[in-house]
Image (cartoon, rainbow, N blue to C red):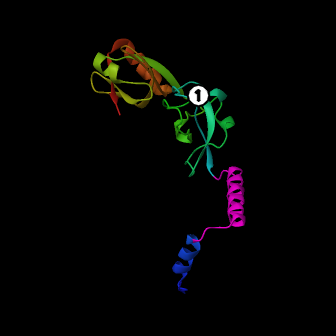
């Protein structure tokens, strides 16, 4: 047997030898300690509140609707505690597991209102879903409201949430005229 002076050859020679019982026990103890250490290692993730289930827009959030999850990287605009979200409402429908951000929440001011609009086109009414954003248009092409949030749909009736001034105007126009919505 020749002795090699290169490091890779020395490592290969050591690996070919059968390890002694003491070495095997020390290796097993080291692996067990490493496993125990990683089991108690603190989570270095970034906490964010997510929807615990599919949530509709406009309904006040409760503790049962929210859960805290840790992400590998920070989620921009997210909340690290559910207490800041309880009682607030969402602008749009949200799927379970999606982080809730400041942009998903409806404003806390009372300058918005909901109005029911009978859509002139049944085909379009079937396509519109809660959470969609729409513009409300008269038969003459006048835009009554822009970027309204669809809160609910029932047949040809679509419930929209929009600023209070626009809601009053849309409600008054819907009494006399057929209205249309355009999807954004």
Query: Measuring 65% from the left and 31% from the top, which residue is drawn there?
Result: 86
Mark 1 residue element: loop
Residue 21 picture location, percent across and down: 70, 64
Relative to 159, say whether 11 is above or below. below
Residue 122 picture location, percent across and down: 30, 16
Mark 1 surroundings within 10 Å by alpha-carbon count, few (fewer than 14), some (14 through 19), many (20 or more)? few
> Nearest the camera: 163 or 121?
121
Query: Measuring 57% from the left and 71% from the top, which residue is drawn there?
Result: 15
Number of numbered discs overlaid on the protein picture: 1
Residue 92 picture location, percent across and down: 48, 31
Relative to 183, say whether 2 is above or below. below
Our reading of the magenta stretch's main secondary structure is: helix
10 relative to 152 in the view: left or right? right
12 relative to 176 in the view: left or right? right
Residue 41 visible in this rendered orientation of the protein: no
Residue located beneath label 1 in the image:
110
Q: Is residue 27 magenta?
A: yes
28 relative to 149 in the view: left or right? right
Residue 81 visible in this rendered orientation of the protein: yes
Query: Measuring 41% from the left and 21% from the top, which residue is drawn there?
Result: 170
Q: Quadrant of residue 107?
A: top right
Relative to 93, say whether 12 is above or below. below
Q: Is residue 26 magenta?
A: yes
> Nearest the camera: 154 or 44?
44
Query: Measuring 68% from the left and 67% from the top, which residue is drawn there?
Result: 20
Query: Magenta segment, which residues?
Result: 17-44
> Nearest the camera: 49 or 121?
49
């Amino acid at each position: 047997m020749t002795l090699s002076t290169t490091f890779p050859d020395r490592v290969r020679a050591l690996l070919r030898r059968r390890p002694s019982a003491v070495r095997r026990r020390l290796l097993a103890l080291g692996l067990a300690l490493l496993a125990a250490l990683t089991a108690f290692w603190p989570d270095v993730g970034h906490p964010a509140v997510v929807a615990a289930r599919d949530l509709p827009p406009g309904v006040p959030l409760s503790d049962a609707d929210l859960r805290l999850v840790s992400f590998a990287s920070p989620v921009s605009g997210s909340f690290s505690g559910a207490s800041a979200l309880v009682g607030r409402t969402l602008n749009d429908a949200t799927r379970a597991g999606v982080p809730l951000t400041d942009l998903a929440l409806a404003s806390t001011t009372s300058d918005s209102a909901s109005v029911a609009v009978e859509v002139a086109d049944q085909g379009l009414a079937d396509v519109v879903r809660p959470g969609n954003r729409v513009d409300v248009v008269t038969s003459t092409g006048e835009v009554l409201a822009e970027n309204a949030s669809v809160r609910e749909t029932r047949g040809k009736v679509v419930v929209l949430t929009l600023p209070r001034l626009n809601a009053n105007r849309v409600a008054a126009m819907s009494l006399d005229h057929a209205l249309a919505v355009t999807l954004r």
